[in-house]
Amino acid sequence: MENIVLIGFMGAGKTTIGRLLAQKLNSKQHDFDEILVEQIGMSIADYFDHFGSEAFREIETKVLQQSLQLNGIISTGGGIVLKEENRQFLQNNPNVIYLQANLDELVHRVVLDKRNVRPLATSKSPDEIREVYLPRVPLYEESAKFVIDTTEKTPDAIVQEILDKVEVI
C-alpha cells in the first residue's frame, strides 16, 4: 500500500482520521506525536520549553524522512510544512491529504482537547492562533495532493472522502 500522509493544523483531525483510516485499510498508523515523544524522551511541550522550536523542527524533519519509508497512514504534526525541505518530501508522495477546517472550529477543537496539549496553543488567544494558522494555509495547500474539508463532518465521512480520492494499492 502507498502511504497516506495526513497534514493540517492542530485540531484538524490528523490523529483521529489516521487511526480510523488504518483500521479501515487494515494498516498501521504512524503518529508523529507518539514517534517524536519516543525519540526525544519527553513531552513535546517540555522539548519546546527546553530546546526551542528550531531544534524541534530539526527532529521533526528526521521523523518525516523515517516515516515516509514506512507503510501505512502517517499523521504528521501541524508544523511539518514550515520547512521547505519537508514540503519537498511531502510533494514527492502521491497521497498527501490536507485536512482543512475553518479556524473557529479548529480553535474550538484545540481548546476542548485536554488529552493532547499543544505548545503553540496553550497560552494563545484565538487571534494569536489565527496569526500562527494563516501563514501555514498556503504551505499546506502547496504540500498536499488532496484537500479534505473536515468542518462539521463526522470522522467516518472524512475517511470515506479520503478513500474516494486516493489510490490504495
Image (cartoon, helix red, strand yellow):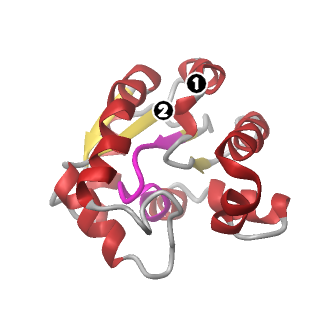
Q: Tag 1, which secondary structure? A: loop
Circle 2 residue: 96
Q: Residues within 10 Å of mark 1 (few under 14, many from 20)?
A: some
The residue depicted at 81 percent of the width and 65 percent of the height is 38
Question: Nearest the camera: 76 or 83?
Answer: 83
Total tally of numbered discs in the picture: 2
Whether the magenta-drawn stretch holds residue 13 is answered as yes
Which label sits on residue 164?
Answer: none
The residue depicted at 41 percent of the width and 33 percent of the height is 166
Residue 48 spot, x, y in % from top left: 67, 57
Q: Tag 2, which secondary structure? A: strand
Q: Is residue 131 visible?
A: yes
Are dots 1 and 2 in contact, CB under 8 Å? yes
Spatial CA distance of label 1 from label 2 is 6 Å
Question: Nearest the camera: 81 or 27?
Answer: 81
Residue 47 spot, x, y in % from top left: 73, 61
- 136 over 55 or under it: above or below: above
Question: Is 121 displayed left or right of 118 in the figure?
Answer: left
Question: Is 85 displayed left or right of 134 in the figure?
Answer: right
Quadrant of the rendering where the N terminus is positioned: top right
Question: Nearest the camera: 100 or 48?
Answer: 48
Instruction: Specify the segment rendered in magenta.
Output: 5-17
- Which quadrant of the view contains residue 148? top left
Circle 1 residue: 93
Quadrant of the rendering where the C terminus is positioned: top right
Q: Amino acid at mark 2?
A: Val
Q: Residues within 10 Å of mark 2 (few under 14, many from 20)?
A: many
Whether the magenta-drawn stretch holds residue 135 is answered as no
Q: Is residue 29 visible?
A: no
